[in-house]
Amino acid sequence: MPHSSAPSAPATSTAPLAPLADGARPDPTPFALGHPTHLARLPARVGSAELLKVPAPAVGASAGEAEWAGGAGGAGGARVARLLNLGNALAYGGEMGMPEWVMLDCGLLPTSFMGFCRRAADLSTRTRAALNERLARLETTLSPSRLSAEELLGVPRGPLRDEEWVPVAEFCALPTLTPGQVMGYSLFSLEQGLGVRAKALGLALHASLGARAQLGVAQYSNTAALRAHLRFGPLELVDPLTPLHTRAGETFIYRLAIPPEGALIDMAAGSRLRYTSHDPSPYAAPEEGRWVRADDVGAWGALRAHVAAGARAALAGARATPLGDAEVLVVTDR
Ligand SMILES: CC(C)(COP(=O)(O)OP(=O)(O)OC[C@H]1O[C@@H](n2cnc3c(N)ncnc32)[C@H](O)[C@@H]1OP(=O)(O)O)[C@@H](O)C(=O)NCCC(=O)NCCS
């Protein structure tokens, strides 16, 4: 299942776990987690920040990376991957976290997870407790053979230690068969504002490798996600009502033109909030387009026919009404 979807959370329930701003905490560190071959293709810095490269799997990592990753076994990368996976499940909610084989086959091996991490000591109390609880629960379910393998490889277990790195926001995109087009399949944030920054970081890194467009899958009702994606530009509707998803009926496929690298680097740093110039107020009267309820399947079916007939359509806004209904602003060219 594409993971770029919020499986069960209604529009208004994607509240961040951490408190809003915490001026006492350092800015989070940009990271990339993936196969060492791919990490080697990424720049050493993003803007003024050093990119922390975490190899997983670590076999084949350069000497420095292997050392960082926890010695010859490179077990540190496996621990960071586990923490990323648990954070992802925490943000998405329910039991719909990314299966570990998906993380390996579709993320770590073909591409890299890109985002922001913190030392465990700098996490909010709530996030640290939630991750520790999930770590403890997971560790009781590991099979005997997995436990043996982890012991052999020296993968750390147990509660978070102050000095270890913990991903707090992540974006993952895969190359596609179309040159210059990547498929964004995972985005989460445990702290308000870091989801947009993680996506900006990931798009900037992919842009540095030649990407110009990003495909994605999302739900009309996931207002927080849509408003995060819309910071980068309108979402061109490739398929307004796809049957190809566990949550068909509310899921659409979009294409985003990747903004210029410089703007993305500023957004990743948090010094720029959005690339697009559209009015950030969801209640401003739209200059063009119309607001459609997220659950209006009939409207999405009609729009699909419209797109199939050659029209172009895009999402340009998303909002939650005072009654809690999700709506999106649809713009068409005819
Ligand atoms: C989607 C997600 C990554 C966004 O993270 P973020 O960038 O840190 O999000 P923010 O809290 O800064 O919110 C982004 C925008 O959504 C709005 N928003 C946030 N929560 C909202 C909610 N519950 N209802 C309505 N709008 C909301 C914010 O006000 C902000 O809008 P703005 O552009 O006017 O400032 C995060 O909500 C998340 O992890 N969700 C669960 C996983 C998920 O759904 N992933 C996306 C799959 S497509």
Image (cartoon, helix red, strand yellow):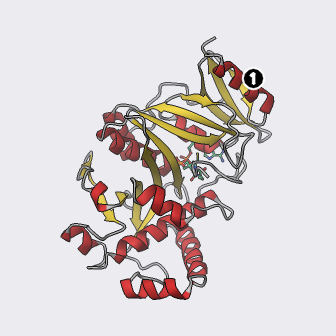
Q: Is residue 285 visible?
A: no
Q: Is residue 211 above or below residue 169?
A: above
- The residue labelled by disc 1 is 302
CB at disc 1 and ligand 1 closer than 8 Å:
no
Q: Which of the pair 223/213 is nearer the observer? A: 213
Extreme residue in the top direction: 334
Q: Is residue 242 visible?
A: yes
Q: Give the quadrant of residue 332.
A: top right
User: Percent position (x, y) of residue 205?
Assistant: 33, 45
Task: Mark 1: give few (<14), some (14-19) or many (20+) Cα within 10 Å.
Answer: few
What amino acid type should be assigned to the residue bearing mark 1?
A: Ala
Q: Give the quadrant of residue 262.
A: top left
Kindly state the secondary structure of the residue where label 1 is placed: helix
Extreme residue in the front direction: 177
Q: Residue at x 64, y 11 (%)?
A: 334
Q: Residue at x 37, y 34 (%)?
A: 180
